Image (cartoon, rainbow, N blue to C red):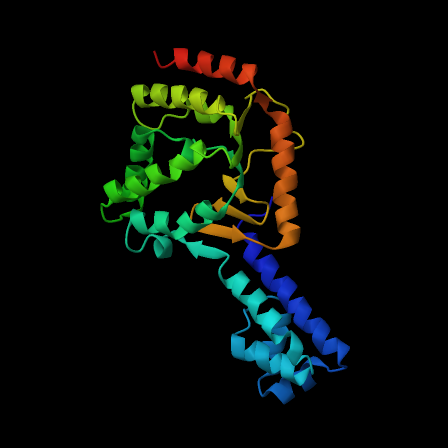
Amino acid sequence: MPTSSNITEARHAFGQRLRRLRLDCGLTTRELSRRCGWHESKSSRIENGKVAASPKTIEKWAQVCGTEAQTGELLEAARGIDGMYVEWHEMEASGLRQAQDNVQLQWERTRTFKAYAQSMVPGPLQTTAYTWAVLQGIRDRRGLRDDTEAALAVRAERQEILDDAGRKFDIVLEEAVLYRRVGPPEVMAEQLWRLLQIAALPNVRLGVIPRDADRSLMLPVENFWIFDDRQVNVELVSAYLTIRQSHELKLYTADFRRLDDLAVHGGPVVQLMGSVLTSYN
């Protein structure tokens, strides 16, 4: 499962694409660099994914290779790579509310959601008290200004999409999520009851991977969401990763299926949560 290495891989793949353009027109690295007006080492670093190519560099590269018709497509691909990795301090520069607003449009336009969580209950499934504890923890850990109330309001609005019968949700949780304390015991008990209610919704399929499941084929990974099989978002320690490249989307959807195969659904989920609930009473 790719993580922060996605940026490096994407830049390398893009650099190899530029390399093929150079080779197809019969130019050496040295000759292309001479015609572009920069040092040979710059071309080498770009082709090997060591540095990102600027828009002007891409335009000049395409011009020298006689492939100006591909310039627009190349620029779009480069912009997609630049937008893949956003550090939390950038995303939350103005507080938690900004981070919630930044992803709101993506949620509104999506009809089919897939989500995997190994650390905590996913946002739309959270109770108000659970979300409050999560947001306060983020605020304190990252030293953000206190706009928890405003961020909580955006989260609450997002949770309403669960009631939209036209949207489908396929959620897989690790069993450890049910035991991992986020707030006092009463908050966890309320959260588990909420999960039982959500599991009964006709447009939600909730699975839980038991702690004793055989993980030899598929180990736990970072929390991620798949939106209409066209975009994946992954929450890393330092950043928010957005993935749109088709070959990487296939990796995430394939691993989601493996995780889902490990999970129990329906009645066994209810029994499992009932057992966990007793530990909070």
Q: Taking 174 as reference, is 31 above or below it? A: below
Residue beneath the point at 36% across and 57% down: 90
Q: Position of residue 270 (x, y in %)?
A: 50, 15
Q: Nearer the viewer, residue 65 or 35?
A: 65
Residue beneath the point at 33% across and 34% down: 131
Q: Nearer the viewer, residue 247 or 159?
A: 159
Q: Nearer the viewer, residue 272 or 168?
A: 168
Q: Taking 85 as reference, is 164 above or below it? A: above
Q: Position of residue 231 (x, y in %)?
A: 55, 49
Q: Can residue 50 be seen by looking at this rendering?
A: no
| Quadrant assignment for the C terminus | top left
Left or right: residue 239 compared with residue 258: left
Q: Can residue 266 be seen by looking at this rendering?
A: yes
Q: Residue furthest left?
A: 146
Q: Position of residue 248 (x, y in %)?
A: 63, 50
Residue beneath the point at 66% across and 85% down: 64
Q: Taking 190 as reference, is 161 above or below it? A: below
Left or right: residue 197 compared with residue 140: right
Q: Position of residue 247 (x, y in %)?
A: 66, 52
Residue beneath the point at 36% across and 47% down: 100
Q: Quadrant of residue 228?
A: top right
